[in-house]
Amino acid sequence: MELTPIKAYVADYIDDFHQQFDGVLKSKSEWLTEAVQHLATATGKQVRPLLTSLIGKLFVEDLPQKTIDAAVLLELIHTATLIHDDVIDEANTRRGVSTLNAIYDNRIAVLMGDFILSSALLKAISLQDLRVMNIISSLGRDLTEGEIKQYETADKVLLSEETYFEVIHQKTAILFMACAEIGAMSVDVSQDDIDRVRLFGEKLGYAFQIRDDIFDYYKSNDVGKPTGNDIREGKITLPLLYALQNTVSMEQEACMAILKQKHLSQEDVARLISFAVDNGGIEYATKRMQGFVDEAKALLEIYPCNEAHKYLDTLADFIVERKR
């Protein structure tokens, strides 16, 4: 499944989005200019800006400038967090393209991430909407806390599905929630509608992160990025979590002992992946992911089945069916 039909539906919006995104990041620094150009070649499917625009068009036919501005600032925040994540994870590639920390070094990459984040804050202020500012301020805090909590959970080898969902709520779902919520705010709908689409965004965010977690159990050439990274760092995502919690065997005990070692070899990672796959972890995670998407779609059933509604359903399906 591809996003081409959705992008065609909001083509003018996407063109304006790209122009503004590039314009916000104009800099006198040669390195920053090169970095922005490089990021343009490494961007993903732009699910979040599409979500913001489709939520707006669910309620109005013509999107105001405020919707585009909102999408730009949210994508800037997302981009900054990816740069910082790559530094923390010591990742050399993302979607098959070299990361900024691999091209320059960690110091420069962190500063570039800070520059983009600061640009997002300036964009947020320009909207002159205290509700948006409040969301953005909380967003930065929650994203950071979510990442820290994930490492804390890995360090303590905590086996708790509740904790897992708390982590992915803060590190992923909350940004989807902000995209949907601010998209609705940008077209001046009721608080009930804002609350409903915010919950829709949360469900999509959970599904998106579970899909990313499932990718970690496949060969890198199948999904376009290095795999096994989460496991190598001791992060127990949903497939492995399910297998560990629902299997009692010598192999389960051996896998727990491996996780407590902290420093995992390639053989250790391969063994944990096999254990999760062989004990129903992928099937369980896939079921939970589809459940969140079904719940998300159900939330929008009260709205007319216009094109935006149809494409929001398509976007939800894309999240679970995407290959990378």
Image (spheres, rainbow, N blue to C red):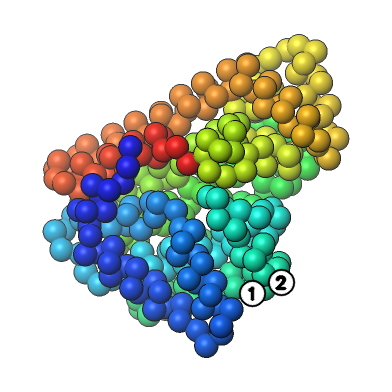
Image disc number at residue 111: 1
Indicate the position of residue 149 as horizontal and vertical percent values: 67, 49
Name of the residue lying farthest toward the bottom: 28
Point 78% across, 39% down: residue: 156
Image disc number at residue 107: 2
Crowding at mark 2 (Cα within 10 Å: few <14, some 14-19, many 20+): few
Point 70% across, 68% down: residue: 105
Point 73% across, 46% down: residue: 152
Indicate the position of residue 255 as horizontal and vertical percent values: 77, 24
Between the C-alphas of marks 2 and 1, the distance is: 6 Å
Report whether residue 190 is seen. Answer: no
Judge whether 7 appears above or below 211 on screen. Answer: below
Indicate the position of residue 91 as horizontal and vertical percent values: 66, 53
Q: Indicate the amino acid at tag 1.
A: Leu
Crowding at mark 1 (Cα within 10 Å: few <14, some 14-19, many 20+): some
Point 15% across, 63% down: residue: 62
Work out whether residue 64 or residue 90 is closer to the camera in this orientation and state it.
90
Marks 2 and 1 in Cβ contact (< 8 Å): yes
Left or right side of 212 for 180: left
At mark 2, the secondary structure is: helix
Q: How many marks?
A: 2
Report whether residue 13 is seen. Answer: yes
